[in-house]
Image: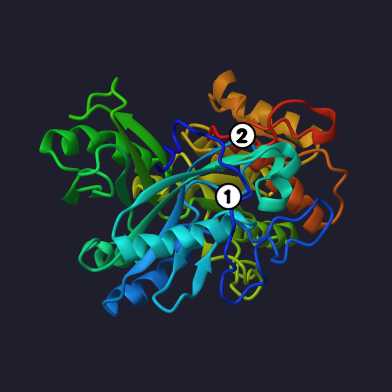
Amino acid sequence: MKKDPWKDPVLPTTRKLAAVPGTRPLVPRKLGTSLGTRPERGIRMRDVLDDLIGWWQAGETVGMGTVVATWRSAPRPAGASMLVGPDGTAVGSVSGGCVEGAVYEEARDAVETGVPTLERYGVSDDDAFAVGLTCGGILDVFVEPISRESFPELGEIAESVDRHEPVAVVTVVKGPDDRLGRRLVLWPDRESGTLGLQRLDDAVAADARGMLAAGRTGLLHVGHDGERRGDDLTLFVNSFAPPARMVVFGAIDFAAAVARVGAFLGYRVTVCDARPVFATPKRFPDAHEVIVEWPHRYLQREVDAGRIDERTVLCVLTHDPKFDVPLLEVALRLPVAYVGAMGSRRTHEERQARLSEAGLSKEELGRLSSPIGLDLGARTPEETAVSIAAEIIARRWGGTGERLAGTDGPIHRTAYR
């Protein structure tokens, strides 16, 4: 009898793992030796969507493994996906180690049987590195066959992702066999598919749309009819929200470096400055857009248009009171993820005094990160950009900004701030 991965949380790593075509054999090795494949950054379903939609449009059936939950220091986030195409091609990654080989075989089985499965992979600290689960991490992977018949909404989802329109896919990953793999697809103003019962769809839709609005991907546990206190069903909510925004004010050399790092981290980067001679796309090739406008007017216009949300990051690098003060009067009253301003400590004190005179409360002033960035001893624009990015990451995940060697507890946090 096959083990229930939810009752047997740690599966042995000694099972025979097949090599993925196009890579070296994925077999367990001792610490300090090559793993055979270079670790990748987390590959979410969004990143394999082009390959998936190509096979889907051709009428092929594809096996897909998706990370739906992680514990401890698992190397890939929820939503990371791996595909196995009809020709055996592997696309994407769920762990970067030997788990890949196991998921590959499970995906091929899912295509043959048409039956989705939930697998849990976890190892001891001693074996963790060899299989791509650092520090004894644990991850749950939902493996399913994907075809036009099983996932008719995929084409519309791909169109929404391409247009940067928010959409969430809710999938039953644990529950009765007749519910397993059922999907409800949610847009802000409509929905498609079903989880099996209208009452369940209605109950789940509100929570899933809340996760979509925040750009969050993760699990929901509900009763058979959607009761919030139940745990009969485990649902995976995969949110395809537009990328979070980073708005950089001030067209200076530091802004170019910040835009480069911001784009690397996945933000949609806007650079804004009132001076047309400096605010040019040529000077900021990594920015998605360059705006010539007074910063406070542009920010207010974006707020009024609903294009600023709780994930937005605002970096004020103008270093000029005539720009800084009116801009921060708007920024510090917004429910955004981060507001940072460049300047010396003396500049910060003078800026705080002006903002206080303008009527901002102590609570609002306390939201300002200034001088911007973490204390890395940065000197160059590039080093300063890394310092700013480090503070943004620490703020997002609740990190301390201290050296990991001097801290205890989990290395990776799961709570999004």
Residue 399, quarter of picture: top right
Residue 59, quarter of picture: bottom left
Q: Residue 201 carries which label?
A: none
Q: Residue at x 47, y 35 (%)?
A: 334
| Relative horizontal placement of residue 143, taking residue 57 as reference (left or right) | right
Q: What element carries label 2?
A: loop
Q: Residue at x 61, y 34 (%)?
A: 413
Q: Residue at x 84, y 54 (%)?
A: 32
Could you tell me if residue 278 is visible in this image? Answer: yes
Q: What residue type is labelled 1?
A: Arg
Q: Residue 413 carries which label?
A: 2
Cα gap from disc 1 to disc 2, whole angstroms: 12 Å
Where is the N terminus found, in terms of image quarters? top left
Looking at the rendered image, the disc whose residue lies closer to the viewer, 1 or 2, is: 1
- The foreground one among 270 and 184 is 184
Pointer 1 residue: 76
